[in-house]
Image (cartoon, rainbow, N blue to C red):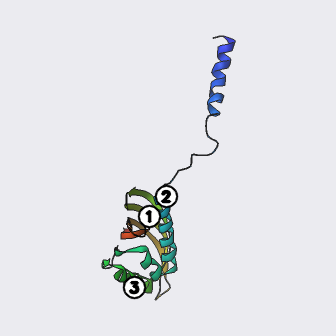
Amino acid sequence: MTHRSRFSALLLPFALLAFIPKHPLEVVMSPAEQELRALLTTYETSLNAGDAARIEQLYAEDGVFMPAGFPTASGRSAVRSAYDAVFSNIRIAIHFTVDELTVQGDVAYARTHSAGTATVVATGASGPEQNRELFVFVRGPKSGSWKIARYMFNKTS
């Protein structure tokens, strides 16, 4: 091996380093994905605030809430009543992490998991709260805004 070929062999790794981006590539989200993530953030904030009125507005008119351990609530007014019942019993302080978000036209779904604490209103006792969730969203034909069409959760194992 000549001096020149040894130099070229040593130079190649450094030349390749020049092509590695200085910052990790940013994930580019579609406008729909951005809107859905904002909706999930609003839902999280409203849930943590115990704001059933605000949560009701995040649901579609025919939205369905399927909470673990409680009856299914169908339609906005039933959803509102179900959240009122939940908040009369517990206060929640959780954070959602999006594991999967898929948009297909005017329908989308998100698979998430959450972790935080739940406090029993009657006793003040607090403990860990961890769930996995499935959200189904629809985009309104008139408003163009995303709403929760179906939501269910269960405890992580």
Q: Secondary structure at mark 1?
A: strand
**Circle 1 residues within 10 Å: few <14, some 14–19, many ≥20:** many
| Residue picked out by circle 3 | 85
Residue 57 pos. (x, y %) = 44, 77
Labelled pair 1, 3 in contact (Cβ < 8 Å): no
> Who is closer to the viewer here, 10 or 152?
152
Q: Secondary structure at mark 3?
A: helix
The residue depicted at 61 percent of the width and 40 percent of the height is 21
- Under mark 1, the amino acid is His
Q: In this image, 85 relative to 12: left or right?
A: left
Which mark is drawn over residue 31? 2
Cα gap from disc 1 to disc 3, whole angstroms = 22 Å
Quadrant of residue 87 within the rendered picture: bottom left
> Who is closer to the viewer here, 137 or 157?
137
Cα gap from disc 2 to disc 3, whole angstroms = 34 Å
Residue 137 pos. (x, y %) = 38, 66
| Residue picked out by circle 1 | 113
Residue 134 pos. (x, y %) = 37, 65
Q: Is residue 117 above or below residue 90?
A: above
The residue depicted at 66 percent of the width and 10 percent of the height is 2
Labelled pair 1, 2 in contact (Cβ < 8 Å): no
- Under mark 3, the amino acid is Ala
Q: Residue furthest front?
A: 142
Q: Residue furthest top?
A: 2
Residue 94 pos. (x, y %) = 50, 71
Cα gap from disc 1 to disc 2, whole angstroms = 23 Å
Q: Quadrant of the N terminus?
A: top right
Q: In this image, 49 relative to 10: left or right?
A: left
**Circle 2 residues within 10 Å: few <14, some 14–19, many ≥20:** few
Residue 151 in view (yes/no): no
- Under mark 2, the amino acid is Pro
Query: Which badge, 1 or 2, is on the more N-terminal residue?
Result: 2
